[in-house]
Image (spheres, rainbow, N blue to C red):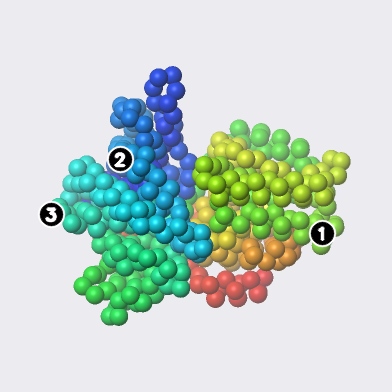
Amino acid sequence: MIHESFDRLVVVSNRLPVVLKWEHERWSVRAGAGGLVTALAPVLSRNGGVWMGWPGTSEQADVHQPLREFSDSQGYLLHPVILNAEDVHGYYYGFSNEVLWPLLHGFHTHCNFKLDYWEKYQKVNNRFAQEILKVTTENDYVWVHDYHLMCVAREINRGLSHRKCGFFLHIPFPGPEIFLKLPWRRAVLGSLLEYDLIGFQTSQDLRNFVRCLECLCSNTQVHTEQNLAWIACGDKEVKAGTFPISIDFEEFAELAASKEVSNRTDTLHLLHPEQQVILGVDRLDYTKGILHRLEAIRQALIRFPDLKGKIALLQVLVPSREEVPEYQALKEQIERLVGEINGQFTEPGWIPVHYLYRSLPRADLVSFYLAAEMALITPLWDGMNLVAKEYCVCNYREDGVLILSEFAGAASQLYSDAILVNPYDVNAVAEAIRRAYYMHSSERQSRMRRLRETIKTYDIHFWLDTFLQAAFDSRPQEVPMAGFSTFLSSIDRL
């Protein structure tokens, strides 16, 4: 049992942690990818429980049997929430990805505030709530994840049944100057207040949430202690806290030290014998700052000719939302810019940008982490960014440098030993690349050692324990966080 206060942990997310594919007249099931799956699947495998979510298909064929078979192999139950194509279009592609995703990342000009999207979003959140009530008891703890399901607790509480229910937001939460542009702002905030505990990635996200409440509720009262806040807003009371998500340190460290990864890493080093490899790993999305990153590489080669032939960017771009025209256009822009940079600077025996557009097996990805002398993680805004933490953990030789956007949630924990950059300032990013290239091995080692120690101390188990402790014990924990002013002073100091 994970915690003595409940029988089972029930994780609820938009998608199940698997990918289903119809082949040979039956469904095949394989483990999914992504930050949430990386974080929670090992926890449920060790402790048992339930994971509820949409299976990713609106086909009519029965998916229950293959999911049961997969559940048996994983050690926890997968329970599908079946949605039809119309629901998926309005709730997922519509409200979740055309309204909440851009809004919460500060790209409000990308939002499509269609009333039909909002109606479908509420309908599907109600569907999830009904499934939760069918599958769980009052002795379970229901942990709802991310922006797709903000209204689930409200729908549960409309009935006579009660569930202990927490919510964790994996992406940023903006201030009122952005969030209040949402036409249904009161309904969404009111729905979040129906949870017993709301978790955010950073203290800035929590402050932004409180500021939004204060704008819409004149008598908001807040008491804070360490990472927790007790909030009263009208007749609603909720506990909220800062719980920076992390990864399984031991799992990644063990894989990085394996012979399979070591052989792959040696092969990569042979391909770049006189170069320092700069690694970028991102899902295709406009929030990741990939165009800005590529332009920074170009500026580095223009401004610092001594880097020509000495650095090579390995950019891994994981396919995402390929059916959305905006994402198709972004992919075309990225590939055009890669071609321009390579055409401008390539010399015999040296290509400045290596571009991979595909998902990679974990062993391949870890070998890239281990082979890269630098990681260039420069999102325009990100809830946490687990790639930054994975890179550091896998760099057990402690010879790498993390260049990290100050707008990534991970910066609030790793700011002291990463090189923080403003991704919009491509010249400053170019200077950071040159600085990392010439960084002495002793400084690389001391920085990376401290980064790894921080991630090891505050790993995925710490994240889980602190959230559940806050849900049931109300005892605040001290977590390594910094405010934006600390970022700025840290950058100036560096």
Name the residue: 78% across, 46% down. 342
| Residue linked to disc 3 | 160
Quick one: label 1, few (<14), some, or many (20+) residues within 10 Å? some
Q: State how far apart marks 2 and 1 are (Cα).
A: 53 Å
**First along the sequence among labels 1 and 3:** 3
Q: Is residue 174 above or below residue 305?
A: below
Could you say which is closer to the camera, residue 395 or residue 380? 380
Name the residue: 44% across, 19% down. 24
Q: Quadrant of residue 214?
A: bottom left
| Residue linked to disc 1 | 302
The picture places residue 451, in percent across and down from the top left corner, at 57, 58
Could you say which is closer to the camera, residue 101 or residue 133? 101
**First along the sequence among labels 2 and 1:** 2
Under mark 1, the amino acid is Ile
Residue 81 disc label:
2
In the visual, does 296 lie left or right of 304? left
**First along the sequence among labels 3 and 2:** 2
In the visual, does 417 lie left or right of 69? right
In the visual, does 459 lie left or right of 141? right
